[in-house]
Image (cartoon, coloured by chain):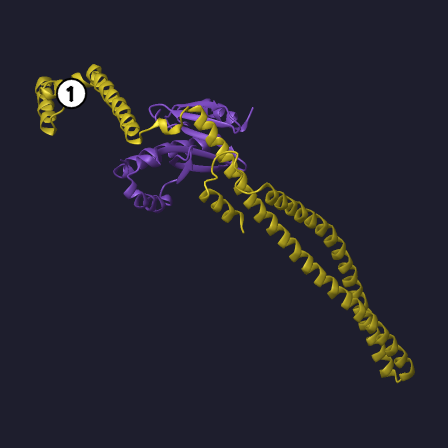
Chain colours: A yellow, B purple
Amino acid sequence: MSIFSKIVTAIRGGASEAGQAVVDANAIRIFEQEIRDSKNAIEKGKRDLTGIMADKMKEDRKVTELSADITQYEQKALQLMEKGDDTLALEVAEKISEIENELAIHKNASSVFETKIASLKELMKKAERTIRDHERELNMVKTTESVQKAQSSISKNYGSGIGKLGDAKESLNRIKAKQQEREDRMKAAEQLDSENGAGTLNEKLAAAGVGEKSNGGNDVMARLKAKAAGNK
Amino acid sequence: MSQLENIAEEISAMDEGQRGGMDFDFQPIPGDQEVMQVIIEGREELPIFLAEADSQLLCICYLFSEDEVQADKRSEMTDLMLDMNMPMPLSSFGKTEIGDGKHMYVVFGALSLKSTAADVVLEISTLSANAIDAIEALSEYLA
């Protein structure tokens, strides 16, 4: 059964208070052991992988070398055949055959190493997944326990229980009343500000038709005309 | 100093703008598990609790007790809560036992332990606003 299901069962059974284990300690120990095993497997896997990859590189290098040798001997054999020296050509051909046998061995070794590398990588991936998975599940257990403990601290601190805190509706009303009061105060302050400010006097004067407020182009024209008449 | 105390100190040292114009009061709560109570000025009735739980930082705000819900409308309300979980920014609805078989509905958020003080401020202020909106929106289910 997954840890998730175990926690569901425990909570349905009412084990949601502090001190009540949601998952038995043995299961947790097994999980932790499996995480440690997987981590060790990955460490060992990394070391093995380095070794095998080096071995494969060695084989691959040998394959390249031998292939080059074969090409060279083949050219030589062809030259000898052109010259009609079939005896020596046969000797070279035998040498080529020998190298080809050796080449096959190294090619085979390389492919064996390649398979090993692939399966080692797959094994490490699996171990990583196990770790991730187990850690997530352990996390769930530990979080459940932490929440229970936190809950118990909060409840104790609030005496007969956090439930005392609210009647939720009443709390909401009180918060809203406070918010309203704050807004009212801010509005009042704004009003006071604007009443005391210089802006209002000008606004009042303008409203009364007195003051600096321009009444448009006609006013300006009239003023300019008056000025022009005065200058004459 | 614990992680929670660090966060509390950092937030207290922030300027008004960084705190989103909110004033926070932090109060550690004694017990087996470290819990930090956060009170937002003007919202004293809805404190928020921060608790470090293994790999995450839980922020919890209690909404109302199961007793406060009209019994015949409870499943309709919890269904609605599930529907609302995804649209609700940063927080989720939950339910928790507070002892003596008494259960409370909560809104909560879970943060990484690597969260910055600014992340926590955003979480707390969003959680508080979500809690107020939730009680208001769900008040028709309350007795």
**Foreground of the two, B142 or A180:** B142
Chain for mark 1? A
Q: Is residue A28 above or below residue B6?
A: below
Disc 1 secondary structure class: helix
How many marks the image carries: the answer is: 1
Residue A101, percent across and down?
Answer: 83, 73
Q: Is residue A136 left or right of residue A36?
A: left
Q: Which residue is mark 1?
A: A203
**Foreground of the two, A162 or B132:** A162
Q: Is residue A87 left or right of residue A17?
A: right
Regarding residue B115, the answer to whether it shows in the image is: no
Residue A106 quadrant: bottom right
Residue B34, percent across and down?
Answer: 51, 28
Regarding residue A205, the answer to whether it shows in the image is: yes
Circle 1: residue type: Glu
Residue A25, percent across and down?
Answer: 59, 41
Residue B140, percent across and down?
Answer: 25, 38
Q: Is residue A48 above or below residue A36?
A: below
Q: Residue at (68%, 50%) from the top-left corner?
A: A42
Q: Looking at this rendering, what residue extends furthest in the right direction? A: A87
Q: Is residue A2 above or below residue A116?
A: above
Q: Is residue B141 above or below residue B50?
A: below
**Foreground of the two, B104 or B125:** B104
The quarter of the picture where the C terminus of chain A appears is top left
**Foreground of the two, B116 or A60:** B116
